[in-house]
Image: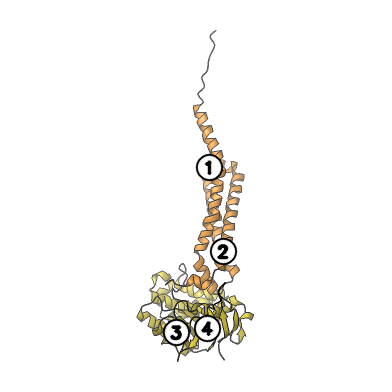
């Protein structure tokens, strides 16, 4: 009886494995990059609001309230963005969302934490500056 | 009795031995328009900053209505006792004209139902039309924006108005208009108005003119 030989083509499977390995490798890098962006970008946005903060100070708003206003504005935008992204994923692929809930919560939490830190530091920096210097027109 | 009294006020910037404001003593009465003139870097804005309670003098004292500023809550002082007007108007760009004038009142816990009619009245008093009140500041001319800023400064009923180069961004006609409004507020409604400027022509509209040079304030004849 002639022996049967099988030649299984695993190229497709290898490709999928390679992509998966790459994603596993890239995921932590993407998380770190996102966290760094959160750490810098939102603080810069608050620093750009220095003039509005100065007007608020002139009108008699306390430093604490100005810091809270600046921080709340940015943090609420960040949270809203994350919720919209989560909603998008739920609609697009509910199964994937269910499987990766813990990862999503951890990554989202890290992102919010970085943004909050950045925003709070920036709002302190903005309210320590001399108010009139921020409002004067450079000649 | 003077509304604002400065007694031997001096101010030094960090690590500087030369005072930005040197031993300034003067008083400001209600119902008068004052001008402080001087070149850039003469200490005008530093003096204004101390009058506004944004900086504390290194030496000397400032009293508002007989009370030393050291003993007052500076945020409350700025909220209720003084108002400021700036060269670049400094209105909130995302609030309408009416909301800009209502905002200081809301900070003083005035209810919106009370604040809105009062704001409308103030805006009308400086020549802003009803249809302009719903617009954003960017849709108004420079002169109109400055008049909105004046209306905002009157919103809380503060009797001391500090104006930092209020006509700096305006043409001659609008500058005259703004100075006429400030003059009228001082003489007809009893406000004490202090205008800081480098323009002698603007200063001529004032009742009393001070000259500031190298941190020293002197009254001009």
Q: Quadrant of residue B50?
A: bottom right
Mark pair 3, 4: CA separation: 12 Å
Q: Which residue is mark 3?
A: B182
Q: Quadrant of residue B205?
A: bottom left
Q: Which residue is mark 2?
A: A123
Q: Chain of mark 1?
A: A
Which residue occupies the foreground of this view, B199 or A29?
Answer: B199
In the rendering, what colour is chain B? yellow
Q: Are the residues flagged by discs 1 and 4 from a single subunit? A: no
Q: Badge 4, how many Cα within 10 Å: few under 14, some, many 20+? A: many
Mark pair 3, 2: CA separation: 35 Å
Q: Which residue is pictured at 43% across the width and 77% down the height?
A: B146
Indicate which disc residue B157 carries: none
Most extreme residue toward the front is B17
Q: Which residue is mark 1?
A: A93
The secondary structure type at the circle numbered 3 is: helix
Mark pair 4, 2: CA separation: 29 Å
Q: Which residue is pictured at 51% across the width and 73% down the height?
A: A132
Q: Nearer the viewer, mark 1 or mark 4?
A: 4
Q: Nearer the viewer, mark 2 or mark 1?
A: 2
Where is residue B103? Give x, y as percent.
Answer: 52, 73
Where is residue A82? Give x, y as percent.
Answer: 55, 52
Q: Which residue is mark 4?
A: B160
């Amino acid at each position: 009886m002639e022996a049967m030989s099988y030649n299984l083509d695993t190229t497709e499977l290898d490709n999928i494995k390679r992509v998966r390995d790459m994603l596993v490798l890239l995921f932590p890098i993407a998380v770190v990059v996102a966290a760094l962006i959160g750490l810098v970008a939102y603080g810069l946005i608050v620093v750009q609001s220095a003039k509005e903060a100065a007007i608020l100070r002139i009108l008699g708003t306390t430093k604490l309230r100005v810091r809270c206003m600046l921080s709340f504005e940015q943090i609420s935008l960040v949270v809203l963005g994350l919720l919209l992204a989560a909603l998008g994923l739920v609609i697009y692929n509910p199964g994937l969302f269910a499987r990766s809930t813990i990862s999503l919560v951890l990554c989202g939490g890290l992102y919010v934490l970085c943004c909050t830190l950045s925003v709070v530091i920036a709002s302190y920096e903005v309210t320590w500056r001399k108010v009139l210097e921020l409002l004067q027109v450079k000649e | 009795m003077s509304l604002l009294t400065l007694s031997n006020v001096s101010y030094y910037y960090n690590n500087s031995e030369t005072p930005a404001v040197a031993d300034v003593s003067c008083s400001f009465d209600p119902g008068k328009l004052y001008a402080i003139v001087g070149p850039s870097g003469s200490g005008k804005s530093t003096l204004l900053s101390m009058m506004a309670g944004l900086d504390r003098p290194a030496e000397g004292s400032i009293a508002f209505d007989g009370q030393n500023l050291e003993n007052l809550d500076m945020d409350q002082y700025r909220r209720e006792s003084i108002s400021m007007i700036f060269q670049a108007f400094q209105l909130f760009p995302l609030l309408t004209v009416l909301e800009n004038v209502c905002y200081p009142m809301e900070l003083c816990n005035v209810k919106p139902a009370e604040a809105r009619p009062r704001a409308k009245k103030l805006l009308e008093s400086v020549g802003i039309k009803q249809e302009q009140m719903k617009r954003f500041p960017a849709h108004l001319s420079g002169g109109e924006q400055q008049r909105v800023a004046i209306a905002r400064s009157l919103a809380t009923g503060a009797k001391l108005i500090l104006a930092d180069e209020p006509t700096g961004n305006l043409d001659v006609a609008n500058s005259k208009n703004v100075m006429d409004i400030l003059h009228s507020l001082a003489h007809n409604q009893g406000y004490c108005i202090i205008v800081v400027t480098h323009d002698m022509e603007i200063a001529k509209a004032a009742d009393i003119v001070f000259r500031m040079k190298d941190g020293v304030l002197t009254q001009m004849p």
